[in-house]
Amino acid sequence: MPKSQEDIVRLFFNYLSKSNYDEAKEFMERQRLVFLNNAWPKAMFDILCDFALAEKNYYDTNFEPSKDKMLERKEDENYLDFVYKTLYQDLEKLQTEVDDNYIIKFMTTLLQFISVRLQLLELYDKLYEIGSMNSWINFSELSETVENIQNDLSNFSPVDQVLRIVRYELDCIQHLFKCHEHLGEWSYFDSLISLKESSDAFILWEKCYLNKEPWRFGSLFMSKSTLPPLLLWFKRFKHMTISKFMLYFYGILVRQSSLREVKNTSETKNLHFFTKMQQLKQKAEALSAMLVFESPDYVTDDESSNGGQSITKMDPYIKYKIIISYPKVPVKFDVIEKMTINEEEHSVNKIQLITDENVTYMIMRVDLKIIFIMCFNGKPKNEEREKASTLEFVSMLRCHKYFTSVNR
């Protein structure tokens, strides 16, 4: 039996750190009856029991209320966000009513932790909103948001065991965002490093939820994953990022191993983006489907403008580099250059067509510097269908599907 307030807090958060949320709640309810009645205010037990339930719903991505939830809230408000805000307000009020130094310190720590949770919920809401907009995603901005949350973290003893899990979560998502940011720059080494760091963080995070119960014979027949839904979402997002990495650096990976090995890995691991691009080209009866990287024009000092700068235009056949093409066909990049020069603001989300010498180019940007192109002999047979298919493929590369599933 716990002998002190410190022991009770330590054991409570030890349950939470092992994702034993129900046990944490039951443990605190027992303490309310047998030990801490005089030392702690009754409301503190209620807050911690509700906190354990909130943590369980968080990892279950249960951000919306079920029908049996009776709490009143605004219709447009995230349910779990409402719960954490209520806990925060109750803790702040209770803090003014106690005079025990340890309890006050513990409450301050818990308030800081809940503040981090609220920032994370706001981030996931933002991801859902971004995914619903079907637009270009600024991964640099998302990475900066995560970094700001990380900067708010410190060693909040006695909840440092739970914070360790939060750090893994933040590290995992920040490195995945960084990887997509580097993919947008077509930077092989930086993308690879970020992908490796996100995988390392995920492995550490995953270990926190494995082997939480003794082995049983019946577990041999369990097909359902025991990981909480939030980790499963991260696992899918990481898998999608690996598939995108393989598409962007298909040529490098083939040179490092062999075409057969890359194809076998793609098939066995369900890394499907290259196959999706092939199927898109074949269904559209296009000459080719390709991804192209657009290098920025040179910015040079202009002596004639008193220390100002001017932009030096690059040769289109140097400026545009083919990332991957199925199959390889000649492309008139000077024609592509004319289209990009005449692009309107926000055209990053538009599909454009241009015809030159009986070859039609269907063009859409994936990122600011990555362009998806399908080439047709003459006009597309079904222009609207091919536009819809192109939009769907680009949307997958932009992660929209994964972001809209974060709270499901």
Image: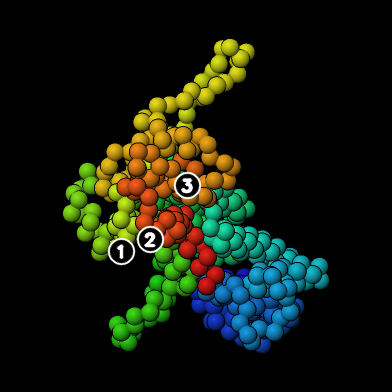
Mark 2 or mark 1, which is nearer the start of the sequence? 2
Can residue 404 be spotted in the picture?
yes
Kindly check if marks 1 and 3 are in contact, taking CB atoms under 8 A apart as contact. no
> For the residue marked with disc 2, what is the amino acid?
His
Circle 3 sits on which residue?
Answer: 352
Where disc 1 sits, the SS reads: loop
State the scheme by which the image is colored.
rainbow
Disc 1 versus disc 2: nearer the observer? 1
| Residue at horizontal 57 percent and vertical 75 percent from the top | 62
Q: Nearer the viewer, residue 247 or 376?
A: 376
Q: State which quadrant residue 46 falls in.
A: bottom right
Please give left or right for residue 326 compared with residue 186 in the image.
left
As drawn, 200 above or below 70: above
Disc 1 versus disc 3: nearer the observer? 3
Residue 294 location in percent, x, y?
43, 37
Where disc 3 sits, the SS reads: strand
Residue 34 location in percent, x, y?
65, 87
| Residue at horizontal 41 percent and vertical 80 percent from the top | 213
> For the residue marked with disc 1, what is the amino acid?
Asn
Disc 3 versus disc 2: nearer the observer? 3
Q: Nearer the viewer, residue 189 or 298?
A: 298
> For the residue marked with disc 3, what is the amino acid?
Gln
As drawn, 77 above or below 41: above
Please give left or right for residue 269 compared with residue 234 in the image.
left
Kindly check if marks 1 and 2 are in contact, taking CB atoms under 8 A apart as contact. yes
Q: Nearer the viewer, residue 288 or 299?
A: 288
Circle 1 sits on which residue?
Answer: 270
As drawn, 341 above or below 275: above
Circle 2 sits on which residue?
Answer: 239
Residue 332 location in percent, x, y?
35, 36
Can residue 143 be spotted in the picture?
no
| Number of numbered tags placed on the structure image | 3
